[in-house]
Amino acid sequence: MKDTFHYDFGKEKDMFTKPKHGWTNLQFKDFSERASYLTDIPIECLDAFIYSLQNNSPVTIYFDAEGWDYYLVSFYYKSYIVINKEQPKLIIIDKDHKKLAKELTEDIEKYLDGWVYWECYKDDEDEFKERRIELNRKLLELKELIK
């Protein structure tokens, strides 16, 4: 890859911006890329980190930016974002999967209502209630694994 960037990302920003109309941004310090509702970001992220911590395996999460895509890959020492645009980029993040998992839980809890209504094309209150329960259950499960 031609472009490789290495950052020491402190928790200066939320890992995910507040979801709005099916869009959010994954961000770390000077890095920010959009992600759309074409993937269920909160559920897929929670599932990936839960699986990783239960099975001692790396985390890999796909994000669709509608026009390009990227992956977050994380394990014991560092994390990486691989961006598939016209010119591929690699972003190196000095955080392990447990730190990212903790930030994920904080951000989902902070913007829980936005994540409940993430799939902006739905309008069934019963589905929203079920989704809130599912998100809270997965948050609790991940928090237990982070301890």
Image: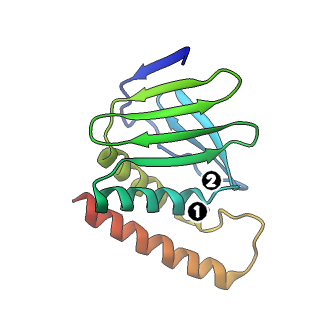
The residue located at (64%, 56%) in the rendering is: 39
Residue 110 in percent (x, y) is at: 47, 57
What is the three-letter code of the residue carrying label 2?
Answer: Pro
What is the three-letter code of the residue carrying label 1?
Answer: Trp
The residue located at (66%, 20%) in the rendering is: 87
Residue 59, label in figure: none
The residue located at (73%, 63%) in the rendering is: 120
Residue 115, label in figure: 1
The image quadrant of residue 84 is top right
Label 2's element?
A: loop
Residue 118 in percent (x, y) is at: 65, 62
Residue 33 in percent (x, y) is at: 61, 35
Residue 111 visible in the shown view: no
Residue that carries the numbered disc 2 in the rendered image: 19
Label 1's element?
A: helix
Q: Are marks 1 and 2 in contact (CB under 8 Å)?
A: yes
Pick the residue in front: 72 or 127: 72
On the picture, is 100 further left or further right than 127? left
Up-down: is 14 above or below 54? above
Pick the residue in front: 44 or 88: 88
- Of the image marks 1 and 2, the number of the one nearer the N terminus: 2
Outermost residue, left side: 147
Around disc 1, counting alpha carbons within 10 Å, would you say few (fewer than 14), some (14 to 19), or many (20 or more)?
many
Look at the image and tell me in which quarter the C terminus lies.
bottom left
Residue 114 in percent (x, y) is at: 61, 61
Up-down: is 58 above or below 6? below
